[in-house]
Amino acid sequence: QMCIRDRLKVQEYDVCLWLTTSQTMRHWNHYLRGINKPTDILSQSFQFPGFAPENNPRRKPIVFKDDFGNVVKDIGDIMLGMEIIENDAKEQKKTIDEYLPVIVTHGMCHLLGYKHDTDKEFRNMRRKERIVLKKLKEMNEKEGIRPENVEDDNDDYDVK
């Protein structure tokens, strides 16, 4: 997650990752989006309408002091429906280690304001995801971590 935040230029900000069940994802998908079915990932920014991609610097992450007076900089939460993610990974013939960096990067991009409602938005978001995943692969190779398990420029994965 640190590399992903670094490549998105938000390394000093916190992100909470929820690893949860389909039942919980159904609840939050219904509450947040009005869709009464489970989903693989939900990203909930703490700053509405969302933290900004690089091309919209007006949006800012939330910054506050906790109960102990410490400054907290937070972007938001990413909820991961692990049952669906595991099934999606299997369908795509990926291991969970191969698929999680892709899905977390996708969620981070959503927290930063990227969308994929139009072809243009999809291409812009996918371009940012590729940059992050390429850097993650480079860092893993440098660290000796299985570089073959990190996606790069290909389109053979599908994040819903």
Image: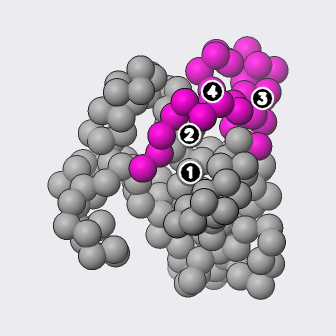
Secondary structure found at label 2:
helix
Q: CA distance from mark 4 to mark 2?
A: 8 Å
Mark nearer the N terminus (4 vs 2): 2
**Coordinates of residue 108 in the picture (x, y in percent):** 59, 56
Q: Residues within 10 Å of mark 2 (few under 14, many from 20)?
A: many
Tag nearer the camera, 4 or 3: 4
Q: Residues within 10 Å of mark 3 (few under 14, many from 20)?
A: some
The residue where tag 2 is placed is: 102
The residue where tag 4 is placed is: 150
**Coordinates of residue 73 in the picture (x, y in percent):** 66, 71
Magenta residue check for 144: yes
The residue where tag 3 is placed is: 139
**Residue type for callout 3:** Met
The residue where tag 1 is placed is: 106
Mark nearer the N terminus (4 vs 3): 3
Q: State which quadrant residue 86 falls in.
A: top left
Q: CA distance from mark 3 to mark 1?
A: 19 Å
Q: CA distance from mark 4 to mark 3?
A: 10 Å
Q: CA distance from mark 1 to mark 2?
A: 6 Å
Q: What stretch of residues is rendered in magenta?
A: 131-160
**Residue type for callout 1:** His
Q: Nearer the viewer, residue 69 or 116?
A: 116
**Residue type for callout 4:** Val
Judge whether residue 72 can be spotted in this image: no
